Image: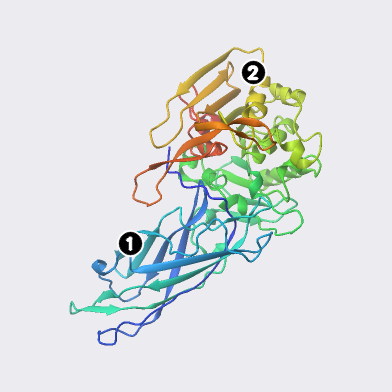
Amino acid sequence: MKKFTKMSLSSLLAVSMLAGCSQADSNKETPNSNAYAVEMHATVTDAGQYIDKMVVDYGDKKIDANSVDNETFEVMMTSTVTYGEAKGQPYAYYDASKPIEVVKTEVDGSVVTVYFNQSAAPTLTWLAEGRNNPAELSFTVTQTKDINELSSDKRELPFTAEYTCAATSYKDLIDEEVAKFEDVQADINYQIHKGSNDALIVWFHGNGEGDFPTKDTNNNISQVLANRGTVAWATDEAQEVFGDATVMSFQTPNAWYFCKKDNYLETCYNEIQEVVKANKIDASKIYVSGCSAGGFMTTRMVIAYPDLFKAAMINCPALDVANARSETEDATPTDEEIASLKDSKTKIWLVQGETDSSVAPEGCAKRIWNILSEGKQVSEKSFEGTAGIASGFTTYEIEGDQFKLSLYKTVDTAEGEGTLGDTRMMGKLVFAEDYNQDGELEEVKYSDHWSWIYTLRNNPENAAGEHIWQWAAK
């Protein structure tokens, strides 16, 4: 398992920034103070995008490293939402009353880099309507004590400066992974990373990353920033397995539960075909993955187009809530529709927690598995969790390598009320974080619904020793 980072319910970024400042004492020898541009960097974690560092370049000044520490800068952030019931109000899940925690400070010549706790400053906001939505952020940067410039004659020249930043939106943040993707406006919008080989990976996001059906925000970015479901497929680790595949990440105009009613299935199929043609994709090398509502959509796509995908990696598919949330009676696949997958060319690997607070395994991944494995000899192998990194899990398989199921052990389980008012067992899944960016992983526990993180970190494994990505690519 690689590094995991804290999940926060999130929204999209638009950044503006103006620094606070103070002047050095008049009895100190200081050069003229200028306004220095501040770069804000961000990273997409398993929990969404966070501000992870601030970079200041002092130009021709050589900075004394001993004069800069974690208390040198105070960075305040506020967040307001643009849409939804909380319009104009501070982000309820973010404490704007205290500075962002600084965990490390580095000096390299004229450049100072300030690292933040990666769980401290989310760039996304979760609204009452159940959507990750664009927010406006503002930062105030204050230098709290002098920094020493080293002069050519070895003198230390203390100074306190002003700081400004021209960033006004998430597009202005420096995030190398997000920068790999391009916005495409279509009948159903999507983000695309155009790879250099002939493979295509399609990702269907969860319900919280959809757009508003009535607000026409057209943001087409929440599915990239809300978790690693998009960017993971374009990482160096993924490229080692799939090559530099093209990655296509849709954003539903509403919710995937309306895929039949609003014709999302055919629309997505047609747009996939356009990408295949434009990027010279080998039709036998198309992969698909999705989580929660996106796991439902992935299931629906494989049923509708049983020979389109080489492999499907389906995470906590939200089949049991589809009818209620779409207010229709035919959104959830029937047993017969699921059974039709036995004749599909698509290989399927299902992933879910043994308990799931949002969608019940018995009505979701386990339901699909029970239908697909009916009458077959099932083998299973259990894997111990890695201390401080991942929960243990059991992978179930049938002969022929076509269908697999990995169920992850949950901890701290207790009886609770499910999404549909049912009574079920609920718990937590074990992951790992490096909040303070010191290279050491720390164990954390998240919702038992977030099993997709394991697939995005290539953790599920079968009896043959293959991890889920290698199995799909094979």
Is tag 1's residue or tag 2's residue first in the polypeptide sequence?
1
Furthest-bottom residue in view? 26
**Amino acid type indicated by mark 2:** Ser
Position above or below: 318 against 170: above
Give me the disc on residue 373: 2
Residue 473 in sight in this render? no
Residue 13 is situated, as x and y percent measured from the top left of the image, at 57, 61
Residue 338 is situated, as x and y percent measured from the top left of the image, at 72, 25
Question: How many C-alpha atoms fall within 10 Å of the one at disc 1: few (<14), some, or many (≥20)?
Answer: many
Local SS, label 1: strand
**Amino acid type indicated by mark 1:** Thr
Local SS, label 2: loop
* Residue at image location 64% in from the left, 49% down from the top: 209
Between the residue at mark 1 and the residue at mark 2, the CA separation in whole angstroms equals 54 Å
Of 302 and 447, which appears nearest the observer?
447
* Residue at image location 19% in from the left, 79% down from the top: 155
Please give the count of numbered marks on the rendered protein.
2
* Residue at image location 26% in from the left, 67% down from the top: 65
Task: Give the quadrant of the N terminus.
Answer: top left
The type of colouring in the image is rainbow
Residue 123 is situated, as x and y percent measured from the top left of the image, at 54, 58
Location of mark 1 (residue): 105
Give me the disc on residue 147: none
* Residue at image location 65% in from the left, 28% down from the top: 346
Position above or below: 322 against 404: below
